[in-house]
């Protein structure tokens, strides 16, 4: 893999637009995941070499929809939250569970 191409990609090096998930952004990037979607109301992370497993966050007016990969499965688990805090805590827990 040509890392020069990766390091110059503006999407991969971009700052997260929705600052409500800035702490998660740092956690994902420190562990080799990258922003595949970076919008105020839609954030998606995938890992190089495993783009079929992803963490997806969609923000609507009344809820935050979170989709997380299930370990050793082709399926995702989807749930909703009312606050950024609850969604962030859940995503962090599922992220570390998935990467064990």
Image (tube, grey):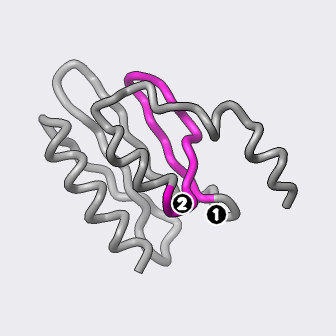
Estimate the x, y position of residue 92 in percent, counting from the top left. 29, 58
Q: What main secondary structure does the magenta stretch of the protein show?
A: strand
Local crowd size for mark 1, using a 10 Å CA cut-off: few (<14), some (14–19), many (≥20): few
Q: Secondary structure at mark 2?
A: strand
Q: Secondary structure at mark 1?
A: strand
Q: Is residue 19 left or right of residue 17?
A: left
Residue at x 33%, y 73% (from the top left corner): 97
Q: What is the magenta range?
A: 30-47
Local crowd size for mark 2, using a 10 Å CA cut-off: few (<14), some (14–19), many (≥20): many
Estimate the x, y position of residue 62 in percent, counting from the top left. 16, 24
Could you say which disc has been placed on residue 53 in the image?
A: 2
Quarter of the picture containing the C terminus is: bottom left
Estimate the x, y position of residue 61 in percent, counting from the top left. 22, 19
Residue named by callout 1: 50
Residue at x 12%, y 35% (from the top left corner): 82
Asked whether 11 falls inside the magenta stretch, the response is: no
Disc 1, disc 2: CB below 8 Å?
yes
Q: Is residue 40 left or right of residue 79?
A: right
Place residue 5 in its image quadrant: top right
Residue in front for this viewpoint, 54 or 9: 9
Quarter of the picture containing the N terminus is: bottom right
Residue at x 22%, y 46% (from the top left corner): 87
- Does residue 68 lie above or below 97 as drawn? above
């Amino acid at each position: 893999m040509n890392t020069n191409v990766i390091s110059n990609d503006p999407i991969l090096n971009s700052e997260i637009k929705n600052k409500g998930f800035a702490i998660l952004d740092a956690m994902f990037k420190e562990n080799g995941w990258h922003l595949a979607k970076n919008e105020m109301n839609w954030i998606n992370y995938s890992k190089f070499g495993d783009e079929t497993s992803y963490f997806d966050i969609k923000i609507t007016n009344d809820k935050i929809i979170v989709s997380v990969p299930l370990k050793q499965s082709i399926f995702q688990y989807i749930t909703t939250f009312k606050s950024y805090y609850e969604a962030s805590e859940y995503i962090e827990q599922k992220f570390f569970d998935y990467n064990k």
